[in-house]
Image (cartoon, rainbow, N blue to C red):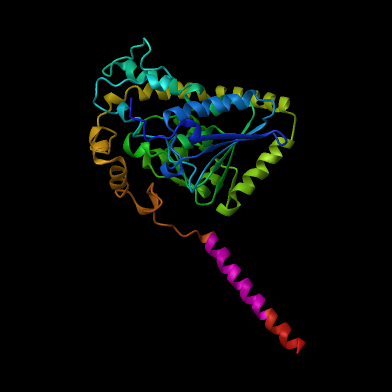
Amino acid sequence: MSDNLNRPPPEEIILYEKDPKTKIATITLNRPGHLNAPTIAARQRYAKLVQQANVDDEVKVLVIRGVGDNFGSGGDLPEQSELFSSNQDSSLLHEFEIPEEADVKYPPKDSYRYLSTLVHHYATTASGMRSLQEFKKISIVEAKGYCYGWHFYQAADADLVVCSDETLFGHSAWRYAGWAARMWQWALMMGLRKFQEMVFTGRPFTAKEMYECHFVNSVVPRDQLEAETHKYALACSRSRPTDTVMMQKTFFEVFKQNQGEYMGSVLAAWLESLLPMVKSDGELELGDDTFDKGLNNAVKDNDELFPEDWRLSKRSRKTVPDPEAEEITQLRSQLAAMQEQLKALEARLGS
């Protein structure tokens, strides 16, 4: 198992609070220095807290948000590096909360079961990957900055998504691994044509683009984000009895399963199990060489191969002017000038 000495305990990464008066609970991802990356233990805690909120009679709405400038950029890949390492002795028992001293032998790395056992576990709610799918109350994701990888999963699984206007959505794995991930759910929520563009180009989509393909419900400036999320949460908490919400969520779950949501997760797990058979054409891979070089450096170098406005990193992206935003700015300037002219005219008339 990876060394976790420098990683905070899950209780510090995943915070939880509830307000019985409003029946709004909040899960806060609290690891801003690492872009709110959940550790394995943090994902497990997240799954348990979602289930806890599902049972709790004092909870009707669950909000998921992140501390700092970003919702998050995915899981803790360095902690999971043994997945991609050539080390034949690595064990993944910790992903199942099985202690290393238990009388359990994990399948060998050269077996199909080595990856298959894990990624089929990812298709369950207990892994913390798709916990919101079986949540029978109302879930709201508050997105900002990066919404990549595991965090993008949560946005796809939530009932509602509120985001700031500078949010970027996507999955960096399409740039360096191309795993199936949970493509079925994203295709359903974004629409096939636009999602295929995201997958095949690997580019992140802006908040405006995600609003246009009906993935997010509201896009606001960053300084209005918390208030907008709270507005949605309060409305949801007051709109109907919790029993009715659970009935409606059961209907929506049947609808999603009829569309193949869980089948898509199982299919993704099966495809991910075949990763050792994927032959690289020279693209960036998550292997010993990449981790030896440094994941951040490798991803940065790979990012520079793409157009500036399609890069994953906010720092290296070229900002594309928004014609509508420019028009609004011009109109505001014109309005301000007219107001100054009006004041001057009133001053002359008054004298």
Q: Is residue 221 visible?
A: no
Rendered-image quadrant of the C terminus: bottom right
Magenta span of residues:
325-341
Give the farthest residue toward the front: 5
How many labels sit on residues? 0
Q: Quadrant of the N terminus?
A: top left
Indicate left or right for 344 with 197 as reference: right
Q: Nearer the viewer, residue 87 or 201?
A: 87
Front residue of 98/214: it is 98
**Is residue 198 visible to the viewer in this orientation of the structure?**
yes
Give percent across and percent down for residue 100.
36, 17
Where is residue 231, by image quadrant? top right
- Give the image location of residue 93, x and y in percent: 38, 19
11 in the magenta segment: no
Q: Kindly identify the residue that appears in the image at 37 percent across and 42 percent down.
A: 201
Position above or below: 326 against 346: above
Q: Is residue 21 left or right of residue 332?
A: right
Residue 52 is drawn in which quadrant?
top right
Q: Decide which of 329, 142 is in the foreground and name it.
A: 142
Q: Residue furthest right?
A: 350
Left or right of 191 on screen, residue 271? left
Q: Would you say the magenta stretch is mainly helix, strand or loop?
A: helix
Taking the spot 70% from the left edge, 84% from the top edge, the residue there is 345
Residue that protrudes farthest toward the top in the picture: 103
Farthest-out residue, bottom: 351
The picture places residue 66, in percent across and down from the top left corner, at: 52, 41
Q: Measured from the top left, where is residue 264 in percent x and y?
A: 47, 24
97 left or right of 177 in image: right
